[in-house]
Image (tube, helix red, strand yellow):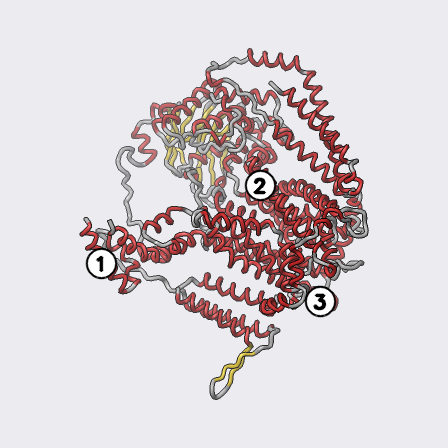
């Protein structure tokens, strides 16, 4: 379904996001990507729908090659690939229904979305997606008035309204509390299985990845260092991915944070404040 | 408990009395466990060279003021063997500049801040000199006691309301209140059209929502040109562009001028709101395969809508003031009548007074109205 | 559902509005004022169009009653593919009736106003040719090698524009001197209610009075009229200064009300007096913003001084406006006008750039470009720093202050 062949991503500032990644993700798989911050997880996900243009190799979704330079082809591709974000990325000031209808953009003529006149079919699809994630009763509420979990469900509904073949999720539960995170991931997993959608999810939580994913990909420094079914992702393998023990205390050396002479230029006003404060504080403190 | 505190206070106070710089850093040393050997930081002194440079700037400014002075009064400084002289006001200005520099040096202000202070002094001296600040100020008491200034000021306080309500514009059959109406009409039309165009331009000008960088830069440049020509300039230009006399086609010229004025304001203000839009929803719309127009419509427009409404109301208030003022240069509206009445002020100040009071009243009413709408909408 | 009633009500309203405006265009007031008559006729026409549209829509709505009922039933039956539960009740679309009516009303007011101004839009047809003609003349004036006449035009334009800058500067200084204390007195967290309310009242009065009124009514009689040495420039400067006080104080008081209350509490807790608290806890926080607000007002004042000049208060307005200015008598000297416009645009832009730079510098400090401004809780760190999609995501809070400052400073 999704094939990476020696895919490289080099950012304009020279930072190497991905280096020769080779992957083959099959139809209907639920893949979790784990790794430390800065390992290239987001870059990998964003390369799939062209939000981050890849600079070398070949990336194929279905039977179309992703071409970051061809805008209209990219739009057609993005219509088939939905994406969920950590910060939900809902438009706060419009209703939940309109947020979900953003997912119908690719299927709607420009002038219709310009005046906000979506067809009855589009609305039906939007309502059905909302029903699938179970918040249809909030359809006319403002998106910003919902809780985090509900907002992420709106985002999932928006993606479902696209009728996608692939769902990309960039740390979808990182800003949710643990029970809500499990609910949202559970919803995603259920929907993905119902509709046979391929799903790639970035995760920080190892236990969530183990519970919900079919396959786990570990990344480090822009390279894939582990790729296998969930059962194979034992603690030792994960420690290898993280290059750090999972249970021990963080062993990074604690340095003395700042030296005084570094502080000096910034300390203008604080010093003056300090002249007044200790004496005054002492006086008031002495009274009782 | 109390005794402990009392024990600790005296040394603190004593130290403060001794030298303030010591107490400045006394707090860290009282907290337990702080190493005693830490070098106490001193407030860094700004580099001397930059201050010398600033003094040079002050000298240059002094020379410039001496060169361009119009006032010829001179200050003599007797020194016994000889008498130095210098032009009075430039010398005083120079003294102030030096005083500012010395003050900045003593308080160890950074060179940039000192330069700012110096620049403010120089600018103020220059501006004051070129508008003859002191000459005019010293004349005020004299003007108040003699001449007709007193009558004029008092005349404004008893305006002739019947003129405002029942008279016609001189030489025509148009009533004065009709001029007010046309002022309001121009403001409404210009606000609606101008704000709409301003919205489009703001969208095009912001790198967030515009198709490409070239468009955004071009629109920004056009917008800053539009903004830099004042509304009077636009009114005069359009009156000429439309042809005929300004009085004949005044309303159109005024509306076009106000539209340009509004475009400038709305595009600038709203452009900043668009720049500050949260990028997440934009990314989401992109990821959903929306094209540029759809993305701007669904993700940018809702986010800036409250500021757009608020700016539009504010622009409407501005337009009322501006369309009243534009009449002064001959386009339609109450301003024309105002300038005619000012021209005939020797016959009495009651008419001008009535127009001015009514202007304040109308602006106040529009302010209240827009405040009410704002509260209803937002 | 009451959709039909709403259409009927809107229809009735617009018909009433049309009839009322039509009748009003025959009252005696309309006999005397052309503007009023035209506005009323315009409103009648606008309302009539709306009424027609509503009538057609209403008829169509009536015609589809049967289909709508069938559709409702179909939707009610035809939901399959999921298990409906408590959450699956589709909500009723909330009514936007009043909102829509307000929009329609705004439209009618627009039509009515456009009719009221009596604009002859046919004049627009001749405009492009004239604009082209005059613009080429203006460009020629700017681009030519200056002869005697053109040199005069350049120097008088520069003089007048610099005088405008001087007027604006003095106006800003006057405004700035008074606005800081006024702003502190008008901030709710700094002052007791007994001072706060009268202060706010005075400030809103000042804001309501256009600067034109200050100039004509107070400062021109007091300081004189005409070119700078006659006192016109001073009158303009003081009119701008006084009306600056209103907006500047309001903005400053808002800035003060928005300060972080923590340091205030800390200094109060350590026994600082009120003045000490303002000096050491409030001013350090708001001063950059206050300076930015002042500079904004300076930019605004340069533009505002033009209109005062037209009334005889000096500056660029005096140079261009009739009866004595460039637009005073025909035929216009387009080359001189071109030169003057060029000077206006150039100086305004230069001042804007400089003050924009200073504002930026004051608010963000010298090293803003290297600093990565974080975006609250946006933990997308693993894309490796400033990656392509991450550019500029952190511009949130800072621009907002500037926009707000200008929004009010511009009045």
Q: Position of residue B112 (x, y in %)?
A: 46, 61
Q: Regarding mark 2 in the picture, which secondary structure is present there?
A: helix
Q: Regarding mark 3 in the picture, which secondary structure is present there?
A: helix
Q: In this view, does A234 lie to the left or right of C143?
A: left
Q: In this view, does A24 lie to the left or right of C217?
A: left
The answer for how far apart the CA atoms under marks 2 and 3 are is 49 Å
Q: In this view, does A90 lie above or below C131?
A: above
User: Which chain letter matches label 2?
Assistant: B
Q: In this view, does C272 lie above or below A65?
A: below
Which residue is disc 2 drawn over? B371
Quadrant location of the N terminus of chain C in the rendered image: top right
The answer for how far apart the CA atoms under marks 1 and 2 are is 58 Å
Mark 1 or 2 closer to N-term?
1
Badge 1, how many Cα within 10 Å: few under 14, some, many 20+?
few
Which residue is disc 3 drawn over? C151
Residues indicated by labels 1 and 2 sit on the same polypeptide chain:
yes
Q: Residue at x 61, y 40 (%)?
A: B369
Q: Which of marks 2 and 3 is in front?
A: 2
Q: Nearer the viewer, mark 3 or mark 1?
A: 1
- Label disc, if present, on residue B279 of the rendered structure: none
Q: Residue at x 57, y 74 (%)?
A: B66
């Amino acid at each position: 379904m999704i094939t990476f062949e020696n895919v490289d991503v080099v950012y304009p500032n020279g930072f190497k996001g991905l280096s020769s990644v080779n992957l083959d993700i099959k139809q209907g798989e639920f893949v979790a990507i784990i790794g430390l911050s800065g390992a290239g997880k987001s870059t990998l996900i964003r390369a799939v729908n062209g939000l981050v243009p890849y600079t070398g190799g070949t990336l194929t979704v279905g039977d179309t090659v992703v071409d970051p330079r061809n805008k209209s082809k990219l739009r057609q591709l993005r219509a088939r690939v939905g994406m969920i974000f950590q910060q939900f990325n809902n438009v706060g000031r419009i209703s939940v229904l309109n947020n979900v209808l953003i997912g119908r953009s690719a299927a709607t003529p420009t002038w219709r979305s310009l005046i906000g006149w979506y067809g009855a079919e589009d609305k039906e699809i939007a309502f059905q997606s909302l029903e699938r994630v179970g918040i249809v009763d909030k359809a006319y509420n403002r998106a910003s008035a919902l809780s985090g979990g509900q907002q992420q469900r709106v985002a999932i509904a928006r993606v479902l309204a696209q009728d996608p073949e692939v769902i990309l999720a960039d740390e979808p539960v990182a800003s949710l509390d643990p029970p809500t995170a499990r609910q949202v991931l559970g919803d995603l997993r259920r929907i993905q299985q119902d509709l046979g959608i391929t799903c790639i999810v970035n995760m920080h939580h190892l236990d969530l990845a183990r519970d919900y994913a079919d396959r786990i990909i570990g990344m480090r420094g822009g390279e894939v260092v582990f790729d296998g079914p969930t059962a194979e992702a034992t603690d030792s393998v994960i420690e290898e991915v993280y290059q750090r023990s999972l249970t021990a205390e963080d062993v990074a050396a604690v340095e003395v944070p700042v030296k005084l002479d570094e502080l000096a230029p910034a300390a203008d006003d604080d010093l003056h404040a300090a002249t007044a404060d200790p004496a005054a504080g002492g006086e008031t403190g002495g009274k009782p | 408990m109390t005794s402990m505190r009392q024990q600790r206070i005296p040394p603190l106070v004593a130290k403060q009395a001794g030298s303030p710089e010591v107490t400045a850093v006394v707090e860290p040393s009282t907290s337990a466990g702080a190493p005693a050997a830490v070098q106490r930081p001193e407030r860094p002194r700004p580099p001397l060279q930059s201050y010398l440079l600033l003094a040079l700037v002050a000298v240059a400014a002094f020379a410039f003021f001496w060169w361009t002075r119009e006032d010829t009064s001179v200050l003599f400084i007797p020194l016994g063997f000889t008498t130095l002289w210098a032009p009075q006001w430039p010398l005083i200005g120079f003294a102030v500049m030096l005083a500012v520099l010395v003050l900045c040096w003593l308080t160890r202000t950074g060179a940039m801040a000192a330069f700012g202070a110096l620049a403010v002094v120089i600018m103020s001296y220059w501006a004051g000199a070129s508008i003859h600040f002191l000459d005019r100020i010293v004349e005020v008491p004299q003007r108040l006691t003699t001449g007709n200034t007193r009558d004029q000021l008092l005349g404004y306080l008893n305006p002739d309301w019947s003129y405002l309500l029942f008279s016609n514009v001189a030489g025509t059959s148009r009533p004065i209140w009709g001029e007010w109406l046309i002022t309001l009409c121009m403001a409404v039309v210009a606000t609606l059209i101008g704000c709409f165009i301003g919205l489009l331009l703001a969208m095009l000008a912001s790198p967030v929502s515009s198709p490409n960088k070239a468009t955004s830069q071009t629109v920004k440049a056009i917008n800053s040109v539009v903004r830099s020509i004042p509304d009077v300039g636009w009114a005069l230009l359009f009156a000429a562009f439309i042809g005929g006399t300004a009085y004949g086609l005044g309303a159109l010229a005024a509306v076009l001028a106000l539209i340009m004025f509004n475009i400038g304001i709305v595009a600038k203000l709203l452009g900043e709101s668009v720049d500050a839009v949260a990028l997440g929803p934009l990314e989401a719309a992109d990821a959903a395969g929306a094209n540029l127009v759809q993305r701007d419509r669904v993700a940018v427009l809702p986010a800036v809508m409250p500021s757009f409404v608020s700016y539009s109301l504010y622009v409407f208030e501005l337009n009322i003031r501006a369309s009243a003022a534009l009449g002064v240069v001959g386009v339609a509206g109450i301003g024309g009548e105002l300038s005619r009445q000012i021209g005939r002020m020797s016959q009495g100040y009651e008419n001008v007074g009535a127009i001015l009071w009514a202007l304040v009243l109308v602006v106040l009413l529009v302010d209240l109205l827009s405040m009410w709408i704002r509260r209803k909408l937002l | 559902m009451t959709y039909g009633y709403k259409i009927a009500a809107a229809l009735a309203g617009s018909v009433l509005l049309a009839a009322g405006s039509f009748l009003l265009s025959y009252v005696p007031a309309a006999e005397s004022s052309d503007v009023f008559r035209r506005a009323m006729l315009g409103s009648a026409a606008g309302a009539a169009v709306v009424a027609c549209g509503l009538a057609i829509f209403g008829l169509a709505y009536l015609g589809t009653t049967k289909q709508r009922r069938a559709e409702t039933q179909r939707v009610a039956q035809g939901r399959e593919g999921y298990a409906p539960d408590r959450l699956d009740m589709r909500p009723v679309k909330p009514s936007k009736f009043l909102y829509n009516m307000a929009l329609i009303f705004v439209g009618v007011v627009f039509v009515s106003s456009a009719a009221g101004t009596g604009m002859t839009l046919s004049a627009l047809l001749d405009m492009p040719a004239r604009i082209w003609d005059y613009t080429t003349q203006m460009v020629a004036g700017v681009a030519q090698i200056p002869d005697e006449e053109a040199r005069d035009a350049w120097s008088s334009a520069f003089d007048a524009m610099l005088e405008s800058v001087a007027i604006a500067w003095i106006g800003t200084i006057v405004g700035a001197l008074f606005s800081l204390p006024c702003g502190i007195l008008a901030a709710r967290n700094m002052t007791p209610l007994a001072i706060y309310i009268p202060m706010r009242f005075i400030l809103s009065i000042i804001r309501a009075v256009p600067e034109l009124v200050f100039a004509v009514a107070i400062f021109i009689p007091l300081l004189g009229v005409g070119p700078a040495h006659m006192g016109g420039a001073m009158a303009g400067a003081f009119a701008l200064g006084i009306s600056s006080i209103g907006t500047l104080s309001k903005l400053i008081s808002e800035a003060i009300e928005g300060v972080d209350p923590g340091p205030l509490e800390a200094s109060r807790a350590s026994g600082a007096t009120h003045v000490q608290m303002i000096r050491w806890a409030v001013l350090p926080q708001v001063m950059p913003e206050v300076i930015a607000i002042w500079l904004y007002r300076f930019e605004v004042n340069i533009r505002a001084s033009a209109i005062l000049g037209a009334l005889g208060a000096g500056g660029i307005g005096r140079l261009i406006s009739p009866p004595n200015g460039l637009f005073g008598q025909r035929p216009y000297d387009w080359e001189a006008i071109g030169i003057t416009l060029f000077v206006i645009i150039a100086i305004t832009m230069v001042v804007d750039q400089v003050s924009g730079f200073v504002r930026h510098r004051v608010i963000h400090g010298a090293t803003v470009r290297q600093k990565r401004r974080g975006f609250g809780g946006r933990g997308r760190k693993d894309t490796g720093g400033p990656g392509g999609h991450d550019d500029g995501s952190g511009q949130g809070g800072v621009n907002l202050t500037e926009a707000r400052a200008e929004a009010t400073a511009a009045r």
